[in-house]
Image (cartoon, grey):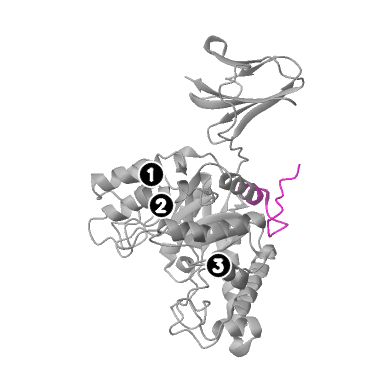
């Protein structure tokens, strides 16, 4: 069976890019979501500048684990110092080597300015790019895209392989703050769709490691999606940007994204969120995760809010906000964030395996207690013995770790199978045994000491 997924924009995407896409689709249909943060290992709240220790993050300092999704931004590669660019590049490489997800937005500065806002941008810049080449605006934009492509193909490499990324360009287009946004210099939704399509076509023709994310700002409804959605052939992931969420409107907006994503065979995410109104010691911002975000997602009676692959928050820095607690936060703030991290519906780096290897997320509805399957560890023989009666031959027996990563699978016509813990290099921990035949499937948990 091919690894190719129907919704993928780039038919020539690399194998690891395709595996990542398929894993994210699997995760969005699981009972949990991944936690992510922008620049989690190249900024920290105690500093106003980027740092070069890619193993440090505020999340890890508080919880002992890293976010699973690393957000980055091409703006910080193209408009900052070479030193800072190197910090962010090494942070991405390190995260990839840990099997984590990398997503890039792009706060692209308007032509001849250092600002990405609508105010002060050249008149009709976005419109000129899509309707022709007035004043050389399209040439300028394509030259900027060339710089991004060069970063993707040359800087973002490990062992000669391009790092798969999810590229989220031209975001929050239904707001009026970016030069590509609503009503900026007469820029229409039709113009926006054309600009997004131009961007995707240009990048995918020159790379093979990119998935594409489209993310409006809240409020979102069917009209916003109809007006601005660039088309299935240009989008792999649909996101929602919404800060200071309130459960009721959030679920309504997220449902619109999730419904559209599922109908069009795409991935849905909460692409930006956080709490920016904390004027005290940071407790409110820290509690936002366990007290607001988690129940808003998990307690949605429709189940739609949980049909997302990840949740991402913004930069921890002293010029930004304490979106997550840090070393100097109060014990109350830290504990609240730890409680969020420990939810069975949330995954940090210690709860997921390499996302560039195929995953299988086992349904919580599958039978974990059936008497038809016996699983026994025989330490002195370094064996795991699986016995199964009443199964119609042939039978498939599989073993997974808790992230859903398959360790081994064998087919047999017998009623017993033996796995070697030495050959499979099984470490102490909890594993899952799945026994399947034409008439029955049983899943058992296994503790290896």
State the residue in front, 299 or 349.
Answer: 299
Do labels 1 and 2 touch, CB within 8 Å? yes
Range drawn in magenta: 1-20
Q: Earlier in the sequence, mark 3 or mark 1?
A: 3
In this picture, residue 233 sits left or right of residue 325: right
Q: Secondary structure at mark 1?
A: helix
Q: Which mark is residue 293?
A: 2
How far apart in space, not on screen, are marks 1 and 2 (Cα)? 9 Å
Q: Position of residue 307 (x, y in %)?
A: 55, 49
For marks 1 and 2, give the one nearer the viewer: 2
Q: Position of residue 160 (x, y in %)?
A: 61, 51
Q: Locate residue 320: give its quadrant.
A: bottom left
Q: Secondary structure at mark 2?
A: helix
- Quadrant showing the N terminus: top right
Q: Position of residue 184 (x, y in %)?
A: 51, 82
Q: Secondary structure at mark 3?
A: loop
How far apart in space, not on screen, are marks 3 and 1 (Cα)? 29 Å
Q: Give the residue at mark 3.
A: 169
**Are there few (<14), some (14-19), or many (20+) residues within 10 Å of tag 2?**
many
Is residue 2 a member of the stretch shown in magenta? yes
Q: Is residue 136 above or below residue 35?
A: below
Is residue 146 a member of the stretch shown in magenta? no
Q: Residue at x 67, y 52 (%)?
A: 14
Q: Is residue 250 above or below residue 57?
A: below
Q: Residue at x 56, y 82 (%)?
A: 187
State the residue in front, 12 or 351.
Answer: 351
Q: Give the residue at mark 1.
A: 340
């Amino acid at each position: 069976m091919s690894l190719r997924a129907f919704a993928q924009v780039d038919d020539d995407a690399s194998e690891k890019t395709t595996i990542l896409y398929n894993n994210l689709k699997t995760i969005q249909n699981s009972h949990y979501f991944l936690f992510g943060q922008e620049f989690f290992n190249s900024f920290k709240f105690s500093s106003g500048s980027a740092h070069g220790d890619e193993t440090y993050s505020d999340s890890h300092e508080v919880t002992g684990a890293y976010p699973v999704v690393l957000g980055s931004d091409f703006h910080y590669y193209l408009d900052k110092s070479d030193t800072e660019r190197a910090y962010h590049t090494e942070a991405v490489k390190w995260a990839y080597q840990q099997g984590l997800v990398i997503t890039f937005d792009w706060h692209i500065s308007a032509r001849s300015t250092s600002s990405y806002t609508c105010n002060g941008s050249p008149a009709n810049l976005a419109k000129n790019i899509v309707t022709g080449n007035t004043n050389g605006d399209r040439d300028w934009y394509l030259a900027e895209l060339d710089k991004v492509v060069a970063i993707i193909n040359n800087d973002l490499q490990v062992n000669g392989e391009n790092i798969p990324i999810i590229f989220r360009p031209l975001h929050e287009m239904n707001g009026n703050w970016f030069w590509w946004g609503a009503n900026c210099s007469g820029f229409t939704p039709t113009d926006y769709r054309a600009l997004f399509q131009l961007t995707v076509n240009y990048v995918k023709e020159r790379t093979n490691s990119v998935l594409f994310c489209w993310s409006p700002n809240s409020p979102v409804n069917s009209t916003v999606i109809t007006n601005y959605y660039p088309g299935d052939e240009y989008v792999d992931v649909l996101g929602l940007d919404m800060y200071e969420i309130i459960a009721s409107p959030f679920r309504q907006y997220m449902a619109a994204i999730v419904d559209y994503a599922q109908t069009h065979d795409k991935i849905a995410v909460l692409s930006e969120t956080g709490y920016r109104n904390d004027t005290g010691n940071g407790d409110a911002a820290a509690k936002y995760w366990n007290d607001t975000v988690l129940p808003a997602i998990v307690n949605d009676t429709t189940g739609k809010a949980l049909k997302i692959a990840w949740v991402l928050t913004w930069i921890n820095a002293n010029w930004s906000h304490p979106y997550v607690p840090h070393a100097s936060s109060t014990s109350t703030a830290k504990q609240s964030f730890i409680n969020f991290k420990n939810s069975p519906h949330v995954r940090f780096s210690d709860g997921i395996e390499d996302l560039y290897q195929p995953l299988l997320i086992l349904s919580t509805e599958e039978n974990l207690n059936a008497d038809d399957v016996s699983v026994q560890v025989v330490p002195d023989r370094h064996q795991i013995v699986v016995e199964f009666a009443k199964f119609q031959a042939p039978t498939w027996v599989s073993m997974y770790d808790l992230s859903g990563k398959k360790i081994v699978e064998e087919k047999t016509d017998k009623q017993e199978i033996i796995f070697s813990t030495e050959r499979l290099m099984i470490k102490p921990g909890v594993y899952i045994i799945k026994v399947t035949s034409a008439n029955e499937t049983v899943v058992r948990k296994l503790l290896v000491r």
